[in-house]
């Protein structure tokens, strides 16, 4: 037993080891100590698969999970689809804890929907943790399950600071992962169960195969686009990658699909007229197509993958069936096939979308999905989500007003507050400092409009309530630490115009603008350079992403093959391999690809400053300060180098600039060196890690490993507003215009003043004018009067 004296803290554990001659650690945890690096029993997957995913893949941001203070917890939403048949689930956890913790009183608890499924001691002698924890399969029911990591951390048995810096545990979310044993269950869904077929809660990448006729023409481009957008809207937040496939007929098959399905990735949508797709279907299915037809059939014999059939007797009926499919956001019809007699689309304005607030709107929190919530204890959190138009503009003195209805308990310490965050940035604090508590019906909290972003926004309320009486060996009353935020609170959007500057890939990433205004794509034309299957699939993947952003299908986009005749009245999207896009499309591009390419290289220098200001320039700067107008940033400094060839390598390129057909319209070009890279880089582009980083007017990327962006070209203003607002916007973007405007104003004022003085003098001093104008006449009049 001499070994026990070496580790007095673990004497009990060591003795058990000595007695049993085996491992004494908990069966659910394997810990690495003595400063060694923990090695997982199995490595975490690089990317999510249908049976494995890292904790990071379930988080909004890829970052470690930090659990600080004496008590803290972090909760993940674990998606479980009804299609998933889970027989066993295992959590492989990799973590690290502080070496200053007190071992007997510090622990990490893992809960699944509130049920404790694992406990791990947090030991300063064994700070690096590797744990394998079983997750009961019967708790993994369809929906979003709550996986919670909670810590109790202490560094002394005496009075301690609960927020001491040494109280921490960090979970490595990239190396911690969940492993499933099971697969997809076989079933026969109906059209009402499309949300369960195309379910974002299915693990692994969301893949769709669009099965079309051989020829890629504008009609097929439109059908594939509608199919991809319909599936993307069902998937919601999950990025969708699309492939085009023309099947090989399997005449010997007796399945409902008479095609070779080995090359179909994921689920599928079959589009085409009845005549075009009849050879691919069993006769009993083909005979059902007597009008605009929607049906769903299994792709494989196990009935774990499915294909939606959208067809009709002619192209118009196929189109009608797909429009209906894009609108199936309600569980009806509960049948495996149906005939669509009529589609009457909703009438939408130019700006539409879920929870989209317009200028001068006054909306209750309840209308944005927030319910009345009461927080008990020291800390809480409530989030309000909404969207703003992509091109909203107002002077910097415009404010969003929150009219808050809330109540809080009596006996709070005077430093108790509600912290308010806008898009994760602290903005304001509401003091909860009345000893007797309080109720406020319309507490006005003003937040500058510039603190919000185009597109999706988030307001987070975090109460921090401290007990009034604390101390060692004192009973602390926690029941009075209560805060209620009522759902009848309101948000008011100020008066604002629809004006913005393009090109702007950041705006495209956040809102899809300008392609999502009008909301259904009525001002958009999409062209692929050649009738290529890869270019078609790339275009469908991009449009599916835009539909997910605004949650409305772009049904009014005009499609075409080739770029010889670009429309002047629409914003353009051009997709293709770089060597297939003609030079007249790329002449004004930030990266001018061709047999001799011109590439911009940034210069590590700030634009030249104004230097010494004249009195007039100082006056215009003062005016901008008074009216709170922000000048447009100076253009970046670049060096242009002409090189031979189009050397994109394996990278993809996304560029946005003024359309060559109309300088007041925008064109976005998505290109790569060849078809293979075009597909793989577009798959990477629509993933959150790349898409969220888009900015400027030129982006180069290679999967998620290389990424570069620039703002190269000049911008132009788009939008609709009154002349006064538009004038103010132009002055805010172009400060030199103040000088011209002020000079014109001063000249006009001087001329008007001179004219008014002349008229006044002519009316009221006419005799004086005549006398001063003719002295001889005045002398003769005096002589006549004397006589």
Image (tube, helix red, strand yellow):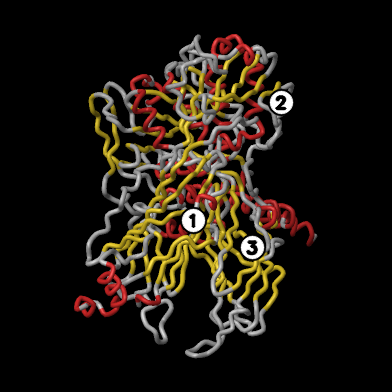
The residue lying at 56 percent from left, 70 percent from top is 463
Quick one: 154 or 403, which is closer to the camera? 154
* In this view, the mark in front (2 or 3): 2
Going by the picture, which residue comes out furthest to the bottom? 473
Residue situated in front as seen by the camera: 340 or 721: 340
Label 2 crowding class (10 Å Cα cut-off): few <14, some 14-19, many 20+?
A: few
Q: Mark 1 to mark 3: distance in Å?
A: 29 Å
Find numbered disc 3 in the image and state the secondary structure of the residue it sits on: strand
Q: Position of residue 746 (x, y in %)?
A: 55, 52
Q: CA distance from mark 2 to mark 3?
A: 40 Å
Location of residue 785 in the rendering, given as x and y in whole percent from the top left corner: 79, 59
**Nearer the viewer's eye, disc 2 or disc 1?**
1
**Which mark's residue is nearer the viewer, 1 or 3?**
1
Mark nearer the N terminus (2 vs 1): 1
Residue 158 pos. (x, y %): 40, 87
Q: Which quadrant is the N terminus positioned in?
A: bottom left
The answer to which image quadrant residue 289 occupies is top right
**Mark 2, secondary structure of its residue:** loop
Residue 76: assigned label: 1
Residue receiving disc 3: 402
For label 3, count other residues whose C-alpha is less than 10 Å away and answer few (under 14), some (14-19) or many (20+): many
The mark nearer the N terminus, 2 or 3, is 2
Query: Which residue lies at the image location 63% right of the left edge and 47% below the top edge?
Result: 356
- Classify mark 1: helix, strand or loop: strand
Residue under label 2: 343
Q: Is residue 208 above or below residue 316?
A: below
- For residue 530, side relative to residue 141 (left or right): left
The quarter of the image holding the C terminus is bottom right
How far apart marks 2 and 1 lie (CA) works out to: 40 Å
Residue 404 percent across, percent down from the top left: 66, 66
């Amino acid at each position: 037993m001499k070994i026990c004296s070496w580790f007095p803290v673990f004497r009990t554990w060591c003795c058990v080891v000595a007695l049993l001659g085996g491992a004494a650690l908990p069966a659910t945890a394997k810990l690495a100590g003595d400063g060694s690096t923990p090695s997982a029993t199995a490595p975490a997957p690089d990317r999510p698969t249908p049976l494995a995913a890292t904790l990071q893949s379930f988080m909004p941001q890829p970052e470690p999970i930090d659990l600080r203070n004496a008590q803290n917890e972090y909760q993940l939403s674990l998606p479980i689809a009804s299609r998933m048949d889970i027989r066993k689930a295992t959590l492989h956890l990799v973590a690290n804890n502080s070496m200053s913790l007190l071992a007997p009183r510090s622990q990490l608890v893992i809960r699944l929907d509130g049920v404790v499924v694992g406990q791990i001691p947090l030991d300063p002698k064994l700070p690096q943790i590797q744990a394998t924890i079983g997750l009961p399969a019967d708790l993994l029911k369809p929906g979003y399950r709550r996986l919670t990591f909670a810590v109790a951390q202490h560094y002394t048995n005496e009075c301690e600071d609960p927020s001491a810096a040494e109280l921490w545990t960090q979970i490595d979310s990239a190396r911690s992962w969940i492993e499933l044993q099971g697969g997809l269950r076989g079933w026969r869904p109906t059209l009402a169960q499309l949300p369960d077929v195309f379910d974002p809660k299915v693990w692994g990448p969301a893949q769709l195969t669009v099965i079309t006729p051989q020829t890629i023409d504008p009609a097929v481009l439109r059908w594939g686009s509608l199919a991809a957008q319909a599936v993307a809207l069902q998937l919601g937040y999950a990025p969708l990658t699309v492939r085009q496939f023309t099947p090989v007929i399997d005449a010997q098959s007796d399945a409902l699909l008479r095609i070779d399905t080995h090359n179909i990735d994921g689920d599928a949508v079959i589009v085409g007229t009845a005549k075009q797709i009849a050879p691919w279907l069993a006769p009993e299915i083909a005979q059902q197509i007597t009008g605009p037809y929607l049906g769903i059939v299994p792709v494989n014999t196990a009935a774990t993958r499915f294909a939606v059939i959208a067809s009709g007797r002619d192209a118009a009926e196929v189109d009608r069936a797909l429009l209906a499919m894009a609108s199936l956001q309600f569980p009806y019809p509960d049948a495996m096939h149906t005939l669509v007699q009529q589609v009457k689309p909703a009438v939408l304005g130019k700006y539409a979308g879920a929870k989209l607030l317009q200028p001068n709107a006054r909306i209750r929190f309840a209308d944005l999905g927030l319910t009345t919530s009461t927080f008990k204890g020291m800390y809480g959190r409530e989030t309000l989500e909404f969207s703003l138009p992509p091109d909203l503009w107002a002077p910097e003195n415009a404010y969003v007003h929150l009219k808050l209805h809330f109540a809080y308990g009596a006996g709070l310490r005077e430093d108790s507050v509600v912290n308010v965050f806008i898009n994760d940035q602290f903005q304001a604090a509401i003091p909860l400092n009345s000893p007797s508590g309080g109720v406020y019906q319309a507490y006005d909290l003003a937040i500058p409009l510039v603190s919000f972003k185009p597109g999706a926004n988030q307001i987070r309320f975090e109460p921090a309530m401290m007990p009034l009486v604390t101390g060692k060996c004192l009973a602390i009353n926690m029941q009075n630490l209560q805060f209620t935020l009522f759902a009848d609170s309101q948000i008011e959007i100020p008066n604002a115009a629809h004006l913005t500057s393009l090109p702007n890939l950041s705006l495209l990433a956040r809102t899809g603008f300008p392609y999502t205004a009008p909301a259904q794509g009525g001002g958009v034309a999409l062209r692929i350079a050649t009738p290529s299957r890869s270019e078609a699939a790339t275009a469908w993947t991009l449009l599916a992403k835009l539909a997910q952003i605004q949650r409305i299908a772009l049904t009014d986009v005009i499609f075409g093959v080739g770029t010889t005749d670009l429309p002047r009245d629409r914003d353009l999207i051009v997709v293709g391999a770089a060597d297939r896009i003609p030079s007249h499309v790329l002449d004004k591009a930030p990266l001018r690809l061709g047999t001799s390419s011109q590439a911009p290289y940034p210069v590590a220098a700030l634009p030249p400053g104004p230097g010494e200001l004249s009195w007039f320039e100082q006056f215009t700067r003062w005016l901008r300060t008074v009216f709170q107008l922000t000048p447009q940033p100076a253009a970046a400094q670049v060096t242009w180098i002409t090189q031979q060839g189009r050397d994109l390598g394996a990278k993809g390129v996304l560029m946005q600039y003024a359309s060559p057909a109309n300088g007041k319209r925008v064109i976005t070009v998505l290109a790569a060196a060849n078809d293979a890279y075009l597909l793989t880089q577009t798959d990477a582009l629509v993933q959150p890690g790349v898409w969220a980083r888009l900015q400027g007017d030129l982006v180069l990327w290679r999967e998620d490993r290389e990424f570069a962006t620039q703002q190269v070209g000049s911008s132009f203003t788009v939008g609709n507003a009154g002349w006064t607002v538009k004038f103010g916007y132009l002055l805010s973007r172009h400060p030199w215009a103040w000088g011209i405007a002020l000079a014109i104003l001063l000249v006009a004022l001087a001329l008007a003043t001179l004219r008014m003085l002349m008229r006044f003098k002519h009316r009221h001093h006419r005799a004086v004018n005549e006398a001063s104008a003719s002295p001889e006449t005045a002398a003769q009049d005096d002589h006549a009067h004397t006589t």
